[in-house]
Amino acid sequence: MTMTNFDKTMSAAAFAEAGEHKTAKEMLGAETKQPHPAGQKAKSKPYLSTLLYGAISLTAYVFLFKNEQLITTTFTKGGVYTWYPVGTAFFFSFIHGAFASNLLNVLGLEAKK
């Protein structure tokens, strides 16, 4: 029994749906790529960014807790001071998020695609 082009395509689709991507590519005759083709460098890990954002995050938390009374007094004045907690929350969210993202990259953990 000979396999038609349609049969090959449908068989490859079945393997791809089952998570056997390499087998599906082989069935279609597609070349499998090397992890790092010649001439391309592997992605470097963001060690410096991780340390930088970690240091900024740690310093900001230490400053926040050491000046708790001043911050509480200033943030509860009302009026224009109402925006201070919002800005502070955005700042901490950005810095901590950047640190966490870089740390996960350094550890080699990536989201599924």
Image: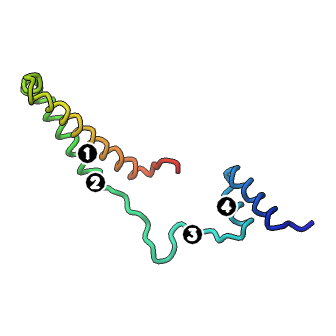
Q: Check disc 1 and report the residue beneath it.
A: 54
Q: Check disc 2 and report the residue beneath it.
A: 49
Spatial distance from mark 2 to mark 4, Cα to Cα?
35 Å
For mark 4, does the 10 Å Cα neighbourhood hold few (<14), some (14 to 19), or many (20 or more) residues? some
Please tell me whether mark 3 sits on a helix, a strand or a loop. loop
Q: Check disc 3 and report the residue beneath it.
A: 34
Q: Nearer the viewer, residue 45 or 7?
A: 7
Q: Nearer the viewer, residue 73 or 7?
A: 7
Residue at the (66%, 58%) spot, across then down: 21
Q: Name which of mark 1 and mark 3 comes first in the sequence.
A: 3
For mark 3, does the 10 Å Cα neighbourhood hold few (<14), some (14 to 19), or many (20 or more) residues? few
Residue at the (46%, 49%) spot, across then down: 110
Residue at the (29%, 50%) spot, across then down: 50
Q: Nearer the viewer, residue 56 or 77?
A: 77
Judged from this view, the residue extending furthest toward the bottom is 39
Spatial distance from mark 2 to mark 3, Cα to Cα?
28 Å
Please tell me whether mark 4 sits on a helix, a strand or a loop. helix
Q: Is residue 42 above or below residue 67?
A: below
Q: What's the mark number on residue 32?
A: none
Q: What's the mark number on residue 22?
A: 4
Q: Amino acid at mark 2?
A: Ser
Please tell me whether mark 2 sits on a helix, a strand or a loop. helix
Q: Amino acid at mark 1?
A: Gly
Q: Is residue 49 left or right of residue 59?
A: right
- Residue 55: image location, x then y, percent: 21, 46
- Residue 76: image location, x then y, percent: 11, 22
Q: Is residue 6 left or right of residue 59?
A: right
- Residue 79: image location, x then y, percent: 9, 26
- Residue 47: image location, x then y, percent: 31, 55
Q: Amino acid at mark 3?
A: Gln
